[in-house]
Image (cartoon, helix red, strand yellow):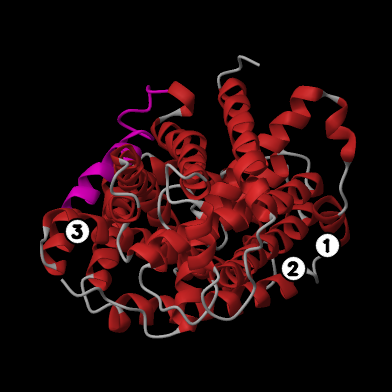
């Protein structure tokens, strides 16, 4: 079948950024920042984006553009004599599916809170009553399934159309609206009374966390995990978009632009949240309730709070749904290449399967709430993706692009450097082959040990 193409470079940049920009930027990033010492976590996270994120993203783009295939077929086309690599292609498809098994539910929560905020559900409620909305929502599986179903149906319906008229057009509009909304919300946060204290926590590193070895290592591991998660590295999410673009621009330069956009959104989300948190005396390490309990309380007590709350959850909906569209596109491409089905048939079957597979995450908060391994169903699914599939998948990409028994660095560099823009340099070979794998393996091992309280 003829491979679809994106209509423009802007479309490629915004769609790739949209895949990276999502719940990880606006929910997970501020949560981890609050729980890991504020600015020191941000600093380490930014370092990992540069030393890990940029080269691995460029590798995924290059593999996709050279093979002109989805992750399940990339290795077969680039290294047909080395069949073992194909295992990672299938693991990439599994990783995208497991990611969506909880991401669709979280996006459904966000959409539901947007509806709540627009409808004035929080107006006039006490703090306890606002907090109770979160618990009541999670206790109602049918409504959660409804909103998750809306997300799944919309995502696969948009992707069932021609790529340029459906996926690309919608993603571009959402991303531009997202960037405008987040800028307006950040400017508003600067006017709050606690802006100074919030920005100090967020922007001035406190190195005291490293006085304890385990605490310091935990911050480092969490920063690495977030760097992989936010850029969707290791499960082929970027490789697929490389297969949809031409060769007029070098891929390292494009990776830099996309990483900057992703970092801008994550960083600006903190500029929105932490001034508000310090203004209203909220615990910065509150975790997920920070978004779904604390912020609605803040908006309820803020002048024009209903407006600002609606804009915030609209922005968050756009951020989450941009990732939904991108990862669904990846799943569709993989399944199409494996089965030869038409796009409409693939979307229908994958949509039904995704809806069914997303239900356990929802039931984990009510019917199956007794399941507490690693914190629950959602946390187990997140652990599989964030601590296993993303780092090990990224390791596979690095090894494949730097070894002769894979694709090889010369082939990778030649593909990545086609077109105008920033180039991969020859000296990067030694860093990518010898340093990157050691960093990934070490932090992967420590991450598992810390997660299970072994270390």
Q: Is residue 320 visible?
A: no
Crowding at label 3, few (<14), some or many (≥20) Cα neighbours within 10 Å? some
Mark linked to residue 343:
none
Q: Which residues are magenta?
A: 352-372
The secondary element bearing badge 2 is classed as: helix
| Of the pair 34 and 380, the residue shown nearer to us | 380
Question: Disc 3 versus disc 2: distance between alpha carbons?
Answer: 47 Å
Q: Residue 382, relative to residue 64: is it above or below?
A: above
Observer-side mark, 3 or 2, equals 3
The secondary element bearing badge 1 is classed as: helix
Residue in view at x 33 percent, y 55 percent:
74
Of the numbered discs 3 and 2, the one sitting upstream in the chain is 2
Quarter of the picture holding the C terminus: top right
Badge 1 is on which residue?
195
Of the numbered discs 1 and 2, the one sitting upstream in the chain is 2
The secondary element bearing badge 3 is classed as: helix
Question: Disc 3 versus disc 1: distance between alpha carbons?
Answer: 51 Å
| Of the pair 323 and 185, the residue shown nearer to us | 323
Q: How many discs mark residues in the rendered view? A: 3
Badge 2 is on which residue?
189
Which quadrant of the structure image shows residue 451? Answer: top right
Crowding at label 1, few (<14), some or many (≥20) Cα neighbours within 10 Å? many
Tell me residue 118's x, y (percent).
47, 70
Badge 3 is on which residue?
337
Question: Disc 1 versus disc 2: distance between alpha carbons?
Answer: 7 Å
Which quadrant of the structure image shows residue 330? Answer: bottom left
């Amino acid at each position: 079948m003829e491979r679809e193409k994106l209509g423009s470079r802007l479309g490629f940049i915004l769609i790739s950024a949209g895949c990276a920009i999502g719940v990880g930027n606006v929910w997970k990033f501020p949560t981890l920042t609050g729980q890991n010492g504020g600015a020191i976590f941000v600093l380490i996270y930014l370092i990992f984006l540069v030393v890990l994120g940029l080269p691995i993203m460029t590798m995924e783009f290059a593999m996709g553009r050279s093979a002109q295939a989805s992750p399940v077929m990339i290795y077969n086309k680039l290294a047909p004599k080395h069949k073992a690599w194909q295992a990672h292609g299938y693991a990439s498809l599994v990783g995208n599916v497991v990611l969506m098994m909880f991401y669709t539910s979280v996006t459904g929560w966000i959409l539901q809170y947007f509806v709540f905020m627009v409808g004035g559900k929080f107006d006039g409620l006490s703090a306890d009553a606002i907090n109770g909305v979160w618990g009541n929502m999670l206790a109602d599986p049918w409504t959660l399934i409804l909103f998750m179903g809306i997300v799944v149906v919309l995502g696969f319906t948009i992707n069932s159309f021609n790529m340029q008229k459906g996926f690309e057009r919608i993603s571009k509009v959402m991303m531009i609206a997202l960037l405008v909304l987040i800028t307006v919300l950040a400017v508003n946060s600067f006017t709050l009374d606690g802006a100074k204290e919030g920005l100090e926590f967020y922007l001035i590193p406190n190195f005291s966390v490293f006085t304890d070895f385990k605490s310091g290592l935990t911050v480092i591991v969490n920063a690495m995990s977030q760097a992989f998660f936010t850029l969707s590295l290791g499960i082929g999410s970027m490789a697929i978009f490389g297969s949809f673009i031409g060769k007029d621009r070098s891929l390292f330069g494009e990776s830099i632009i996309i990483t900057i956009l992703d970092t801008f959104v994550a960083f600006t989300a903190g500029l929105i949240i932490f001034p508000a948190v310090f203004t209203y005396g909220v615990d910065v390490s509150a975790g997920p309730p920070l978004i779904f309990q604390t912020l609605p309380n803040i908006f309820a007590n803020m002048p024009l709070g209903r407006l600002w709350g609606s804009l915030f959850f609209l922005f968050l909906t756009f951020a989450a749904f941009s990732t939904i569209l991108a990862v669904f596109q990846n799943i569709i491409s993989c399944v199409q290449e494996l089965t030869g089905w038409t796009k409409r048939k693939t979307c229908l079957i994958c949509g039904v399967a995704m809806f069914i597979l997303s239900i356990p995450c929802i039931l984990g908060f009510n019917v199956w709430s007794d399941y507490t391994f690693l914190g629950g169903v959602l946390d187990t699914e997140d652990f599989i993706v964030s601590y296993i599939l993303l780092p090990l998948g990224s390791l596979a990409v690095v090894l494949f692009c730097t070894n002769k028994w894979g694709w090889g660095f010369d082939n990778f560099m030649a593909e990545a450097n086609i077109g105008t823009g920033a180039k991969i340099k020859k000296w990067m070979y030694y860093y990518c082959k010898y340093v990157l794998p050691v960093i990934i393996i070490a932090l992967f091992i420590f991450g598992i040990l810390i997660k299970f309280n072994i270390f």
